[in-house]
């Protein structure tokens, strides 16, 4: 391990790769001579589809634009560039998608460098072995994993910790492109290798992975800068329009977490019970006291989804007060009528009505049971085993609702206002989360990696 | 007369904490309001369960976080994010029932 350095400076480009950042903020970050340029590219927040379909939830042009700044600056100045959870979900197709973008940029900008590409996919056979030994633990509210659910699942990934990234950097990689990755590991891997405290490094990473979201005013499309010291870290904005405050930083610690004092990750948890936030001049905040507590057994979080069918939707609205008053009974009647026909035709499918103006936003959690608006928005959602089945269910549900005769009806020409022609939209495959479990991992550095030489032309120097 | 939570809080928000949990944050205006709520135990699992029409067992945790003068409530999602019947993939618009809290 290298001797301790007094400071380790990190430039976090943006909250999610592809969300963008002002060039001026990025340049300001470079002026502070960072030891690392990092970016988190992923999240499970956009839902199960993207992992299942192997597609990115961020736009290709946006990702390429952000990466172009990061790679040209990093490679030309010799600053390591680390990208975590490539392609949004971090499975093999996502990593390969991002690698292709990197190679394009290298060719266009004539950049040559050594790159570590780390995959996070976990073979089913490996999960099955641990499952047989009773070593797959569901997280809170997650059903236990069964061999059947495992068989149906696709693109199973594990959130890697700092170890695989450290291994790639130690072998001299200028750029590390990682699959599914614990977000803070992107920023913490290198400083921990250099002897900095893991608790501080990971907590700083936890905040930097969201970049300027933790500043005030917050933004998902701006850079942030972190300086790690021996017993604290300092956060600062690179945009004069924002600053880090004690309040903005502490409030961010709450964000998307179950318990802000205890944040679990690969191989342990961050304990923030002794953590303090102090404001410094210049819109900066210094954080102390974050601790990393290693768990007895190193576990990683697995994520996986399974395909449950295909979806077709139709958007409609009603402005009829008599229909609005009887909406629950009308929709129930339509569903019964449609299901009878589908049964007779042996078409399987599920119908769901999203009724905006009633409980379209909160569903089962909606405490307000009265419908008091003058219009309702209705999204008909049909899920079938095939796209054809979903189309058939959606079409039949729409036409049945359009002409459904309910008691007291006076508007006999049609019940729905349809804004679009065609009225029905194919939404493609439907996935659901099926795996969100912990699995023990004896050698957390052993994620499959390729070290490749990217040759984009002559080095500018 | 009881006052609305809006007199005590400056941020009331909701978001997923992973695909299986929903987490609600109340950031109080100042330490005094934070301490008042904590001391008087104004927000209980039972009260949250009532506001959201869920069983008390589905309210996982209520944590007071001093560095932000905040109260965090984490509950079970009615369905995992993105399952059939989903209404709010990110869980970002599930905070409104909290506006009914009074003190």
Image (cartoon, rainbow, N blue to C red):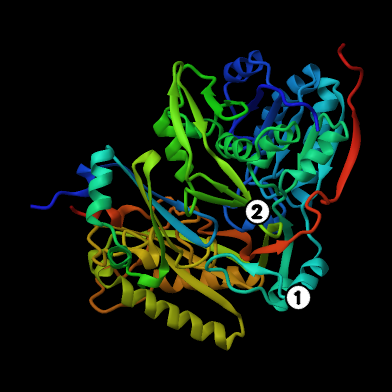
- In this orientation, does residue A308 appear? no
Q: Earlier in the sequence, mark 1 or mark 2?
A: 2
Farthest residue toward the left?
B1
Vertical relation: A363 (above or below) A238: below
Is A259 or A420 nearer to us in this picture?
A259
Kindly identify which residue carries mark 2: A50
Q: Position of residue B54 (x, y in %)?
A: 36, 70
Is A375 or B90 nearer to us in this picture?
B90
Is A373 or A59 nearer to us in this picture?
A59
Residue A133, numbered circle? 1
Nearer mark to the viewer, of 1 and 2: 1
Vertical relation: A244 (above or below) A376: above
B18 displayed left or right of A104: left
Secondary structure state at the residue bearing disc 1? loop
Picture quadrant of residue A412: bottom left
- In this orientation, does residue B94 appear? yes
Q: Quadrant of the C terminus of chain A?
A: top right
Residue located at (65% from left, 22% from top): A7
A392 displayed left or right of A457: left
Picture quadrant of residue A144: bottom right
Is A24 or A249 nearer to us in this picture?
A249
């Amino acid at each position: 391990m290298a001797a301790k350095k007094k400071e380790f400076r990190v430039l976090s480009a943006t909250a999610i790769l592809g969300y963008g950042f002002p060039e001026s903020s990025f340049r300001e970050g470079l002026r502070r001579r960072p030891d690392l340029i990092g970016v988190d590219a992923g999240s499970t927040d956009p839902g199960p589809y993207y992992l299942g379909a192997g597609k990115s939830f961020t736009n290709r042009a946006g990702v390429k634009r952000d990466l172009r700044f990061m790679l040209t600056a990093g490679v030309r100045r010799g600053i390591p560039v680390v990208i975590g959870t490539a392609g949004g979900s971090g499975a093999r197709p996502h990593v390969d998608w991002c690698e292709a973008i990197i190679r394009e940029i290298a060719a266009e900008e004539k950049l040559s460098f050594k790159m570590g590409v780390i995959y996070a996919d976990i073979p089913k056979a490996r999960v099955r072995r641990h499952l047989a030994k009773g070593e797959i633990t569901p997280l809170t509210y997650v059903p236990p994993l069964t061999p059947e659910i495992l068989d149906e699942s696709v693109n199973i990934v594990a959130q890697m910790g700092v170890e695989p990234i450290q291994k790639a950097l130690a072998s001299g990689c200028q750029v590390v492109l990682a699959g599914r990755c614990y977000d803070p590991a992107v920023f913490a891997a290198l400083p921990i290798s250099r002897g900095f405290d893991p608790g501080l490094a990971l907590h700083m990473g936890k905040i930097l992975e969201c970049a300027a979201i933790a500043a005030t005013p917050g933004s998902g499309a701006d850079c942030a800068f972190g300086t790690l010291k021996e017993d604290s870290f300092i956060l600062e904005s690179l945009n004069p329009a924002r600053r880090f405050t004690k309040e903005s930083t502490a409030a961010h610690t709450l964000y998307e977490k179950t318990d802000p004092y205890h944040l679990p990750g690969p191989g342990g948890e961050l304990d923030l019970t002794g953590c303090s936030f102090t404001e410094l001049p210049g819109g900066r905040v210094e954080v102390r006291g974050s601790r990393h507590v290693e768990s007895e057994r190193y576990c990683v979080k697995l994520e996986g989804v399974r395909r449950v069918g295909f979806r077709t939707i139709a958007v409609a609205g009603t402005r009829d007060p008599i229909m609005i008053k009887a909406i629950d009974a009308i929709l129930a009647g339509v569903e019964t009528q449609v299901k009878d026909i589908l049964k007779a035709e042996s078409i399987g499918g599920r119908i769901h009505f999203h009724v905006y103006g009633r409980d379209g936003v909160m569903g089962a959690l909606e405490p307000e049971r009265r419908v008091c608006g003058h219009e309702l928005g209705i999204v008909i959602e049909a899920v079938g085993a095939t796209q054809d089945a979903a189309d058939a269910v959606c079409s039949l549900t729409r036409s049945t609702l359009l002409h459904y005769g309910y008691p007291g009806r006076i508007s006999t020409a049609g019940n729905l206002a349809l804004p679009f022609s065609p009225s029905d939209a194919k939404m493609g495959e439907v996935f659901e989360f099926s795996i969100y479990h912990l699995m023990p991992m004896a050698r957390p550095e052993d994620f499959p990696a390729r070290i490749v030489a990217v040759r984009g032309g002559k080095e500018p120097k | 007369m009881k006052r609305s939570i809006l007199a005590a809080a400056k941020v009331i928000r909701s978001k997923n904490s992973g695909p299986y949990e929903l987490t609600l944050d109340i950031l109080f205006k100042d330490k005094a309001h934070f301490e008042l709520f904590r001391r008087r135990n104004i927000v209980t699992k039972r009260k949250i369960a009532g506001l959201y029409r869920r069983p008390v067992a589905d309210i996982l945790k209520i944590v007071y976080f001093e560095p932000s003068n905040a109260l965090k409530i984490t509950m079970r999602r009615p369905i995992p994010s993105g399952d059939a019947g989903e209404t709010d993939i990110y869980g970002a618009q599930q905070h409104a029932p909290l506006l009914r809290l009074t003190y």
